[in-house]
Image (cartoon, rainbow, N blue to C red):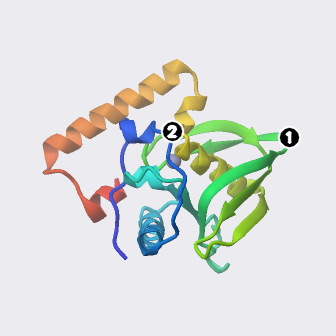
Amino acid sequence: MSMRSILLHPDPRLKAVAKPVTVLDDALRSLAEDMLETMYDAPGIGLAAPQVGVLSRLIVMDCVKDDREPPRPIVLVNPEIVWSSEETAPYEEGCLSIPDHFADVTRPREVEVIWTDLDGNAQRERFDGLWAVCVQHEIDHLNGKLFIDYLGPIKRGVITRKMEKLKRDLAREKPAPKGHEAARL
Ligand SMILES: [Zn+2]
């Protein structure tokens, strides 16, 4: 396993629509392992492949927040929302690609998702609470959509300009941040 660098907004790869995964091979499995390690280290509760520069429809999540509960890492290949509740709920979201910025986003409270697991089995699950927020946020990443795209243009512009400045400062401070350190930013 190895750490991957997390791309920071703005980056054209975060705006791209990711391609469906067609082969479940060792390369995909090691990418999923790397993404989980990178996510836990950040720390975060979800990560989509485009955030590490791979434009494939693959996400990882673990929304267990309680230390007394066992972790539940899940890898979703080609995830698709097949049902959304009419009831919505706001949640203050953040993103590993937009560190230190948070905003309320209103989404369906519950969603049903189908995906393929790493063994090629079809999976289906209804998510609620934090899991529902996370899976919708991560699937958005596969479609080139960020949580700030739900905000008004003024708020989004402020965050984007601050991120542009952060990236300029980082580029000036040190040689291209890579691996472990970059993932923490
Ligand atoms: Zn995100």
Q: Residue at x 35, y 58 (%)?
A: 184
The percent coordinates of residue 138 (x first, y second) are: 58, 50
In the picture, measured across the screen, residue 8 lies left or right of residue 68, that is left
Q: Position of residue 177 (x, y in %)?
A: 22, 54
Could one spot residue 67 in this view of the protein? yes
Residue corresponding to mark 2: 144
Position of residue 47 relative to residue 158, above or below, is below
Q: What kind of element bears circle 2?
A: loop
Across and down, in percent, residue 77 comes to 59, 61
Q: Are the residues tagged 2 and 1 within 8 Å (C-beta)?
A: no
Left/right placement of residue 82 relative to residue 181 reads right
> Which image quarter: residue 168?
top left
> For mark 1, what is the residue?
87
User: Which comes sooner in the sequence, label 2 or label 1?
Assistant: 1
Observer-nearest of 96 and 68: 96
Tell me which residue sits at (36%, 31%) in the image.
162
Q: Is residue 94 visible?
A: no
Assign the N terminus to one quadrant of the image: bottom left
Q: Nearer the viewer, residue 106 or 111?
A: 111
State the image coordinates of residue 154 (x, y, percent, origin top left): 50, 19
Assign a secondary structure to mark 1: loop
Residue that extends furthest to the right in the rendered view of this protein: 86
Q: In the image, what residue type sits under mark 2?
A: Gly
